[in-house]
Image (cartoon, coloured by chain):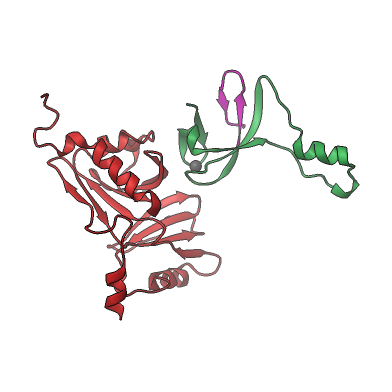
Amino acid sequence: MTADVLALRRSPLGDPPLDVRGPRLHLRELAFRTLLELRGPTGRPAVGPDEHVWPLGPGWWLVDGTPDAAPALESPRAAAWRAALGPGAGVVDVSCHRTTFALSGPDALLVLSHGCSIDLERVPVGQGVQGVLAHAQVVLGRVGQDDWRIHPRASFARHLAAWLVDAAAESWEPWGDQED
Amino acid sequence: MMSLPCPHCGPRDETEFGYGGQAGVAYPARPGDLDDRAWAEYLFVRDNPRGWSTERWVHRAGCRQWFVLRRHTVTHEIESPA
Ligand SMILES: [Zn+2]
């Protein structure tokens, strides 16, 4: 039964998964990540090695963790966070609210800056911002110098994937920006 | 495109924000005592200055926090109130 439910799931980008690779860029969807929003902690919550945490606003955080093994109305991690943060904090499983793109490679920042007016160069590794990318509201997290996570709302995922593939046209080509 | 200074996120494009109108309009202390004209003025009538205007904005696409800033309605200069 469990296996059946998992087999029926479709990520916002559907099947087969988005995975485009060029010499200077790699774009893929990381489907079914466990996404939790935390309300309350004023300091950055400590997360495990398989998780990222991005600041969304004052006392407001997005935790991005590996997919849960079994289907559930609420990820068991939500209860774990609730217990860890204590009363007064809010924890909501928002895994279906957004999906996750990984954009990596030396051209990643360049491609993002085509559609984002935030000065992403100044975002340090391990930090993130909430804002607008190509007219879509997103959470952007920098997991490495050339490695970003993009969390668009599920209904904007197709638009954003199409926009990224188009904006990165030069990065997919083996000859780079050489003229015709 | 105006750039507005969110106190939490820094400068962002105006398209990330929602406009909340004139700042500092207090809810009447005894609303039941107001006649229709005074109540309508409280609800609907706002300053419309040619010059500096103190306004509420919400960073809708970012931290979702409300804040107050001063904007010059002619030049669109922006000041964060002290
Ligand atoms: Zn903000």
Q: Is residue A108 magenta?
A: no
Q: Which chain is red?
A: A
Residue A114 pos. (x, y %) = 31, 33
Q: Nearer the viewer, residue A49 or B32?
A: B32
Q: Residue at x 9, y 33 (%)?
A: A175
Q: Nearer the viewer, residue A27 or B82?
A: A27
Q: Give left or right: position of B46 versus A179.
A: right
Identify the residue at horizontal 25%, vertical 46% (top origin).
A103
- How many marks overall? 0
Work out which quarter of the rendered image holds the N terminus of chain A and state it. bottom left
Image point 21% across, 58% down: which residue?
A: A16
Q: Is residue B74 left or right of residue A158?
A: right
Picture coordinates of residue A31, whole percent (x, y): 29, 60
Q: Can residue B5 be seen here? A: yes
Camera-nearest residue between A134 and A145: A134
Question: Which stretch is magenta?
Answer: B68-82
Chain letter, colour green in render: B
- The percent position of residue A55, horizontal first and vertical second, equals 42, 51
Decide: is A128 above or below B70: below
